[in-house]
Image (tube, rainbow, N blue to C red):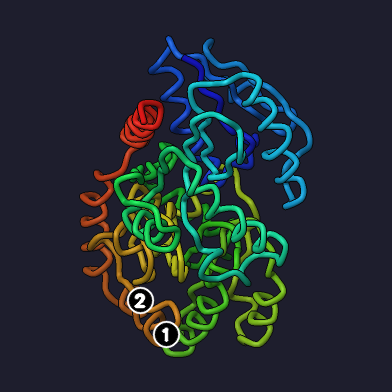
Amino acid sequence: MQIVVNTRLLLRDRLEGIGWFTYQTLKRITRNHPDVHFVFLFDRDYSEEFVFSDNVTPMVLAPQARHPILYYLWFQVSVKNLLKRMKPDLFLSPDGFLSLGAGCKQLPVIHDINFFHHPKDLKWMTSKYYNYYFPRFAKVATRIATVSEFSRQEIAKHYHIPETKIDVVYNGINSFFKPIDEATRKATRATYSSGKNYFVNVGSLHPRKNICNLIKAFALFKQESQSDMKLVLAGPEFWGMGDIQKTLEESGIKEEVVFTGRLANEDLCKVLGSAMALTFIPYYEGFGIPLVEAMEAEIPIITSNMSSLPEVAGNAALKVNPFDLTDIKNAMLRIYNNASVRADLVQKGRLQKQNFSWDRSAQLLWESMVKAMRD
């Protein structure tokens, strides 16, 4: 049996949501199935750490696919020609992109369709590409995997795909997240927040992460609480930073907001685990990995009451309307003023996180792959 996999998002020291999903599931699947030959397709030089076992053959195909025109050339020319030549039992694509007309069974993991609802959150050409091709990918897919029941219903509704053709494969929790001792918390705060306590947002500063409203609500919180709390934004910059900078300038609390940029895993664990709470309030998410990371770090959570986030958070978070600044501010005040609320959320997080593990994710993805090969 031969399975070809799109692994272009396995980038050393630059793994994000889909990259982590790819890494954690494939590491387990390839090792659990030594009788299967996997061909990993990269679009640039790769790190040997991503060749997980002896049954993996890495290949580099040009060009580097980081722009809509290059997406087209990579998936619809280079990858399609390879698939036609190799005739694998399955093409697995963890980022959802497929090769139309490849002549083999294909399984995309479509994490969400935010671009359908919020096309302006992406650059114009990227948005056009996604909204043109992803409905076509969904139609030609043998089966589809996605990361939440919310996303399954979205894909089924908007792309007119039977729900029975879509499998839910939740994300897991990376093992380097853990509770932080008080001495490390103190040292982390000294490094990142001038020794002050802070709320933290984790992830790339993408428009859909709702960072502008988070900053505005934090300004209201500061005004009402008169506290010395900081807001730490832990993640790399993304397209749309101009709006964030403008909001910050107008907020009157510019010095109270800390941008860390991309952090190494060990540092991210410390920054998350040393926070008073995670404030993660996107208006659209297919899953929301920072929620389960915060549960593992045993800190309270404030999150959005929209999209997949209530499904993932369960009762282990204060849920807010991401467009209501007062609602967000009031949740911050509840966390800040009430230790019993914080303790209750942490305890509920210990229970909720048991629903998520990478071992389970890998098993569910493998089951979806087997179904696709049998369909």
Work out whether residue 366 or residue 99 is closer to the camera in this orientation and state it. 99
Q: Name the image quarter holding the C terminus.
A: top left
| Residue at image point 66% right, 32% down | 80
Q: Nearer the viewer, residue 80 or 21?
A: 80
SS category of the residue bearing label 1? loop
Determine the residue positioned at 55% across, 41% down. Answer: 19
Q: Is residue 362 visible?
A: no
Relative to 318, say whether 113 is above or below: above
- Say above or below: 184 vs 247: above
Taking the image as drawn, is residue 286 in sight? Answer: yes
Q: Position of residue 257 (x, y in %)?
A: 59, 72
The image shows residue 28 at horizontal and vertical percentages of 42, 25
Q: Do the numbered discs 2 and 1 sit on residues whose CB atoms are within 8 Å?
A: yes
Q: Which residue is mark 1?
A: 324
Q: Nearer the viewer, residue 116 or 324?
A: 116
Q: Amino acid at mark 2?
A: Val
Q: Amino acid at mark 1?
A: Asp
Using the numbered discs, state the Cα–Cα distance from disc 2 to disc 1 in whole angstroms. 8 Å
Is 191 on the left-hand or right-hand side of 145? Answer: right
Residue under label 2, please give it.
Answer: 320
Residue 201 is situated, as x and y percent measured from the top left of the image, at 50, 63
State the residue at coordinates (65%, 75%). Answer: 244
Quadrant position of residue 370? top left
- Numbered label attached to residue 17: none
Residue closer to the observer: 32 or 114: 114
